[in-house]
Image: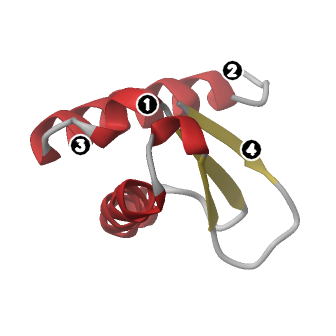
């Protein structure tokens, strides 16, 4: 799940939320590393005032890299579209 808004910051910000429901500490850290890498590759598509919050759901622990990237992209496009309509995504 991805939430996107805009604020008075310099440069886009990205935050991660990975709860214990995702798995033990090792699994949570692995999910965070994978999500950080995906966000790093896509941060250029965000405006300079963007604040992106990524909330990992339990299926992220077992998703392949391709599945995780596809879901991330789908959620990011939806959030950008929703933000473009004038609301927070």
- Left or right: residue 24 versus residue 86 is left
The image position of residue 80, as x and y in percent, is 55, 34
Q: Which of the 4 image quadrants contains residue 8?
A: bottom right
Q: Quadrant of the C terminus?
A: top right
The earlier-in-sequence mark between 4 and 3 is 4
Given this view, does label 2 or label 4 mark the residue nearer the observer?
A: 4
The earlier-in-sequence mark between 1 and 3 is 1
Nearest the eye: 53 or 24:
24
The earlier-in-sequence mark between 1 and 2 is 1
Verify CB contact (< 8 Å) between mark 2 and mark 4: no
Residue that badge 2 annotates: 85
Given this view, does label 1 or label 4 mark the residue nearer the observer?
A: 1
Verify CB contact (< 8 Å) between mark 1 and mark 4: no
- Relative to 89, say whether 36 is above or below: below
Q: Residues within 10 Å of mark 2 (few under 14, many from 20)?
A: few
- Helix, strand or loop for disc 3: helix
Verify CB contact (< 8 Å) between mark 3 and mark 2: no
Q: Residues within 10 Å of mark 3 (few under 14, many from 20)?
A: some
Residue that badge 4 annotates: 5
- Helix, strand or loop for disc 2: loop
Q: Which mark is residue 58?
A: 1
- Relative to 25, say whether 60 is above or below: above
Verify CB contact (< 8 Å) between mark 4 and mark 3: no
Q: Which of the 4 image quadrants contains residue 21?
A: top right
Nearest the eye: 83 or 39:
39
Given this view, does label 1 or label 2 mark the residue nearer the observer?
A: 1
Residue that badge 3 annotates: 69
- Helix, strand or loop for disc 1: helix
């Amino acid at each position: 799940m991805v939430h996107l808004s805009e604020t008075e910051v310099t440069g886009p910000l990205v935050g991660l939320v990975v709860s214990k429901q995702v798995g033990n500490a090792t699994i949570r850290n692995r999910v965070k590393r994978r999500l950080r890498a995906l966000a790093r590759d896509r941060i250029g598509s965000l405006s300079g005032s963007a604040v992106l919050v990524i909330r990992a759901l339990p299926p992220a622990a077992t998703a392949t890299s391709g599945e995780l990237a596809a879901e991330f992209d789908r959620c990011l496009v939806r959030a950008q579209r929703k933000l473009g309509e004038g609301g927070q995504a």
